[in-house]
Image: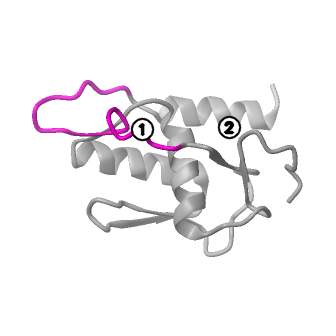
Amino acid sequence: MTAGTTDAIAMNAIITKTTPNANETEVGKDLNLKVDKRLKDLTLIPPGGWRWTCQKHGTKLVADFFPELLAKVNGYLRANEIVIHGDRVAWLQNQMCEQNGWGPEICYTLGSTDLKG
C-alpha cells in the first residue's frame, strides 16, 4: 500500500455519514453545487497553510495538515448541523481552491489534462 493510498483511507475514515434532521442545514442537495477543483498534492503545505472559511458563518479554520483540517471541518459541520451531500473531501478541496485563490500550481480542474501547473 502506498503512502497516497494510506492517506486516502485515513481521510475517508474521518468522514462521517449523517442523516439530516429538521434542525440541520443541508448544503448541496438543492443548490447544484459545483465541485470541479481538486488539490494536486495533499502532502504539501500550500501558501498560507491549510485553511477553510465557512461561507454561512464566516468561521475560519486552519491546520498544519490536510487530514487535520478535514477533521476540524467535519467537527464544525456536525456541531453546526450543516450537512454536505456527496463526497466531503472533494467538496472541501473545491472550497479551498475557490476561497484561497490557489492557481494551477496548487489546484487543478477536473477534466483538465494539465496536472503539472
* SS for dot 2: helix
Quarter the N terminus occupies: top right
Q: Where does label 1 land, which residue?
A: 32
Q: How far apart, in angstroms, are the residues tagged by discs 2 and 1? A: 28 Å
Q: Residue at x 30, y 27 (%)?
A: 18
* Amino acid marked by disc 2: Asp
Mark 2 packing: few (<14 Cα in 10 Å), some, or many (20+)? some
Q: Where does label 2 land, which residue?
A: 7
Q: Residue at x 18, y 38 (%)?
A: 24
Work out whether residue 106 or residue 45 is closer to the camera in this orientation and state it: 106
Whether residue 68 is visible to the viewer of this picture, yes or no, is no
Work out whether residue 80 or residue 90 is closer to the camera in this orientation and state it: 90
Quarter the C terminus occupies: bottom right
Image x and y of residue 9, in percent? 63, 29
Q: Is residue 8 left or right of residue 5?
A: left
Question: Which disc, if any, is residue 74?
Answer: none
Image x and y of residue 93, in percent? 58, 49
Q: Residue at x 80, y 45 (%)?
A: 112
Q: Residue at x 54, y 40 (%)?
A: 89
> Range of the magenta residues?
17-34
